[in-house]
Amino acid sequence: MTASASPTACALRILFLAPEEGAPTHTGGGQRTHHLFRALSVLGEVDVLVSAECLPMLEADLLARCRLEFQGAACVALHRSRPTFVYPPTRGPLLWRKAWFAIRRMRSAVEPRRRRFEPTAAALAALDALIDERRYDVIVGRYLRQTAVSGALEQPRVPVLCDLDDLDEVVLETRIRALAGRPLKALLARWGLRQIEGFAPALRRRCKHLWVASEIDRALVSHPSVSVLSNIPFSPNGFPSRSTPTRRDHRVALFVGSYVHTANRSGLVDFVARVWPEIRRRCGDAELRIVGSGGWDRMASELLAPGVEIVGAVDELSREYADASFAVVPVREGAGTKIKVAEALAFGRAVVAYDHAVRGYEPLVGNGLVSVWSDKDMVAACLDLFAHPDRRDELAARGHALARASFSYRGFEREVVESTVRAARQRVLEGSEV
């Protein structure tokens, strides 16, 4: 685009910095990435760049998966990022290889957190070459770290918009609370938090515009241009136009979440260990169904309890929600908003969630969403909904109506388009003044 061109009169050229996990629509984070890429695509030509900590033998597989998930992208590229040793060695069980990996991982854990946000020299050079070749109007990043390691925040030529979604400070704050009883890990998390609080605001100020997932997060971010981009659920077949009555002949609490998300695993293990036994003692036919991708069967021993069934990945979530009495979200760490709350309401089911998972959904409390502060409250709320089907159906109906009004793709796309066009137009005006 030249300095005299109008971003509303011609298609934009956009570079989308996608996360390493891509845009799988069976996870909450993947759904948001999918929606963001889809919204940007209406503005013009979108290239996708993934900066990944990836073992060499996995690069071809990762690139193929990203090309499938970002269909319609003008091009999809993969750049290696600085390793944080998340991926263990896969070529044989040799003891020396595992030991060397463990040593490097421990070293990575104690090095300055700022290094995890620094681009490599190769990443900077590759991005510079992409900008020269493709002449982007805007760069849009998913997550602050993904945006930083790509090198986008080190270049002054193209305006950058960043979808923060999860604030890194809030992620660590909730992680510290979850690590009670594990002093060494909690100490490392506190050290990391102090560092993040020192450099993250400066990185965010390099962006032209920021998106956050809730009004709570907007109040925490000091930046001249911030807007709320609400998490919205995704279903390939859409959502029901109205909620349907729950079955009276059985009592089913439904948990939906990806195994790969640490907060899901820890929250569910605590729920089964501390909450479910009392629910089952007082409601002998209660069932808990665990649905989600990623390998929940690996935790079979930790989730073994009467009435608990590990279902795993399913082809159609609507059937699980239709058969459920209500959904539970026993998650107590992480940031942003928990998209499974909105998803359950969109499918017409009431939700019982700990107060942390309610973050960003406060207007829905009492309207489809039951917020609890303690394990005792969780037990009481679940038993109440099991015992009173009319009450849970009334809650679900109100929540479904509000979810349809509040969490629409149309509103999501409008916010993305308006913010992106505004950044592109500002770049043109600034270029005209030079």
Image: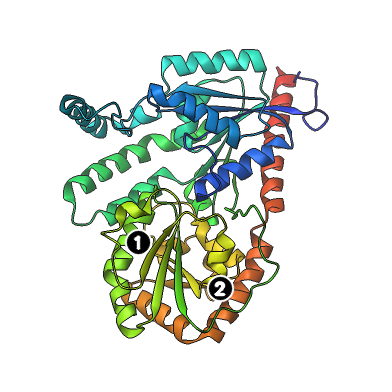
Instruction: Examine the rendered structure and indicate whether residue 68 appears above or below residue 302.
Output: above
Determine if residue 363 is in view.
no
Q: Residue at x 26, y 30 (%)?
A: 108
Secondary element under disc 1, as helix, strand or loop, is helix
Q: Residue at x 25, y 53 (%)?
A: 179
Q: Residue at x 22, y 46 (%)?
A: 185
**On the image, numbered disc 1 is attached to which residue?**
268
Q: How is the image coloured?
A: rainbow
**Which sits in the foreground, 234 or 322?**
322
Quote the CA–CA distance across marks 2 and 1. Answer: 21 Å
**On the image, numbered disc 2 is attached to which residue?**
368
As drawn, the residue found furthest toward the right would be 9
- Labelled pair 2, 1 in contact (Cβ < 8 Å): no
Instruction: Examine the rendered structure and indicate whether residue 195 appears above or below residue 252.
Output: above
- Residue 2 percent across, percent down from the top left: 76, 18
**Which sits in the foreground, 416 or 198?**
416
Secondary element under disc 2, as helix, strand or loop, is loop
- Residue 385 percent across, percent down from the top left: 47, 81
